[in-house]
Image (cartoon, grey):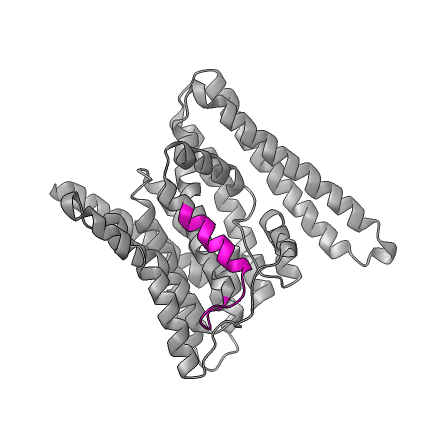
Amino acid sequence: MIRWAMTKHTKFAIAAVVYLVFAAYLYRPYFKGFSAPQRQDLFIISTCLASLGCYVLSRRWVAGFVESFFAGALYGFGPFSLGLLKFHPTAGFLMATIPWLFCPAVFGPKGKWRWLRVPLALLPFVMVLLFFQVGAHFHLYPIPIRLKLHAVDWVGLMAPLVAAKRRMTLIGFYHVPIAALTMGFVMLLKARRLNIMMILTTGTVLAFCGPLFNISPVIWLAFSMLCGSVMIGVGMQGLVCAGYADRKWILASTIAMGTLAIFSLLLATKYFQILFGLASGYARLFVESGKMYLLGAVTMGILFFIVRARLRLSPLRQCLLCSTIALDIFFHAAFVIDRIL
């Protein structure tokens, strides 16, 4: 028992250090000219807390350390979280508290006290309500009250780089993680994890609605991004452990990634044809997205043939998934921040 606890805390420490180092790498170049270094520290701390919160929360459904690590990274360093940086620093801390506030419900009462998980699950929603009520009392609005999602914002789910360049509301999880998200969604749906699906749906619907109780609608999307990040961790674990019977789902993910690659490259061609190259910047971003989707399709194709051949090769599967997702986060998180700060 002591060995297990030590291993658990060691993994937590490793995740915290990596998140911290990556956050410092991303943020510090943009604050060299600031006279007050405290602002950059706030961004670093809030991003790390958000990532660690999702990492801890995902351990309820994800057994693998690496898969939980990337779930946390995609929540804390995802387009939506980074997009909040253009607002007040407290918006990032609100984003960071949400996964931690779900922990009492997820890891809390058991047995005859299990019913307490329902009211405990309302803690993050209550926190959001109180946060905006207190902010309104002091005339502090960290996020514009009337900022909500529109249908056009869904382009950010497929092309986050284009959305960042256009300074739209950022959503989604970059490119390659979409494959794991698809797999995770199917797995949790088949496992009847209706509580996660309910939170995902509620957060998405409220993000499209008007402001209620002085709450900016877009903040509700943080709940959807949290659920999506957990799904990615579950999906990565599913892809690593998938057997022959799961090959159809891997093939479906491969086809989806290939379709997104083709669609992105077709859009790039269309933008390149605009007169005088006025949209060449967007075209290059669509090309970049197409390359990443193609990389994801190749990765999923390799996994499909491994599974079809009835081979386990779990370390190879994990290495392929982690390397491609890590590249996606490493290069494109920096691009998003460059457009935000």
In the visual, does 217 lie left or right of 64?
Answer: right
In the visual, does 300 lie left or right of 267?
Answer: left
* Spot occupied by residue 307 in the image (x, y as percentages of width and height): 46, 21
Q: Is residue 81 above or below residue 190?
A: below
Q: Nearer the viewer, residue 23 or 236?
A: 236
Q: Nearer the viewer, residue 269 or 211?
A: 211
- Give the residue at x 56% y 58%: 170
User: Toward which corner of the image does residue 244 lie, by quadrant?
Assistant: top left
Q: Is residue 236 visible?
A: no
- Give the residue at x 74% y 51%: 283
Examine the structure image and report whether residue 103 is included in the region drawn in magenta.
Answer: no
Magenta-drawn segment: 198-216
Q: Nearer the viewer, residue 98 or 294?
A: 98
* Spot occupied by residue 294 in the image (x, y as percentages of width and height): 62, 36
Q: Is residue 207 above or below residue 145?
A: above
Q: Quadrant of the C terminus?
A: bottom right
Q: Quadrant of the N terminus?
A: top left
